[in-house]
Amino acid sequence: MKLQQLRYLTEVVRRGLNVSQAADALHTSQPGVSKQIRALEDELGIQVFVRHGKRLVSITEPGKAVVAIAERILSEAQNLRRAGEEFANDQLGTLTIAATHTQARYALPKAVAAFKRRYAKVKLVIHQGNPTQICEQVLTGEADLCVATEAIAEYPELVSMPVYQWNRCVVVPPKHALLKAAPLTLEKLAQYPIVTYDFAFANRSLVEKAFENRGLHPNVVLTALDSDVIKTYVELGLGIGILAKMAFDPKRDIDLRAIDASHLFESSTTRLGIKRNAYLRRYTYEFIELFAPHLPRATVERAVRGEEGSRYEL
């Protein structure tokens, strides 16, 4: 039995039993993947997959147990490599953070700058994506941790820890009528075309929920994954923007004005996601504490190990 066979097996499952996609992701051939999985099945004396011709159609009951064990073995193998790297030199290595655009652009910079001053030789990589993409990157080992407001708590394989709460603002061009329409109400917002976040972001649903609760049907004319894109189209006159308050900087966004809308919508919580039972290097714990001072190493370790009393809420 080889680790390579376990990687092939778990990747096929991750790709919805599509061997061709798994082979592409693993940078190998489809016949090679099929051959190694057959060899693993022969060694174990069971069939992991139900087949229809050459096509995999489902996972057998014993196969489900094998896949779960394979995932644990691969996770521990990754932990071994990281432990070896840390004891060899705890000042060298790579820290990969997966984050949504708003978090990468507005929430992470101060922690990143402080971390680089402390660990100048550690390579820091930031991957941007939508909430589902960044969670998947942590699960596959492409990233050490992820930061988002959405999706993290929906993955049982990830430990989800709250970082901070935030709310929204409405952005408009200078001299817009809403600037004089105090107090700001949902009824007033519904009179204008709206530019806001894409459906991939769960906090978008909180905005919709607020309108629905008042029996209103806002005219959303454009959605985007990127706060800066939303602001750009507001500047072009496509509508008013609803976005995270942190994403508005009056010094930079000189062609826009922001109106606080926290009284209109439920607050959202940005969370940190880490794979359960992951081995984290010392500098990863230090980055987390720089980003979220209320999450010291001892707290994070307990949460990652799933120990009693490890659940933390703001």
Image (cartoon, rainbow, N blue to C red):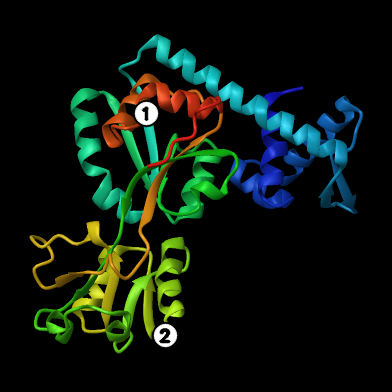
Which residue has dot 1 on it? 94
Mark nearest the camera among 1 and 2 is: 2
Please report contact status of discs 1 and 2: CB closer than 8 Å, yes or no: no
Which residue has dot 2 on it? 216
Q: Identify which residue is drawn at 35% across, 59% down.
A: 267
Q: Can you say whether 300 is above or below 112 in the image?
A: above
Q: Identify which residue is drawn at 87% across, 26% down.
A: 44
Instruction: Where is residue 21? Give x, y as percent.
Output: 65, 51
Q: Earlier in the sequence, mark 1 or mark 2?
A: 1
Q: In screen coordinates, is 149 left or right of 47?
A: left
| Residue 272 image-quadrant placement | top left
Q: Quadrant of the C terminus?
A: top left
Local secondary structure at mark 1: strand
Instruction: Where is residue 228? Give x, y as percent.
Output: 25, 64
| Residue 63 image-quadrant placement | top right
- Disc 1 marks a residue whose amino acid type is Thr
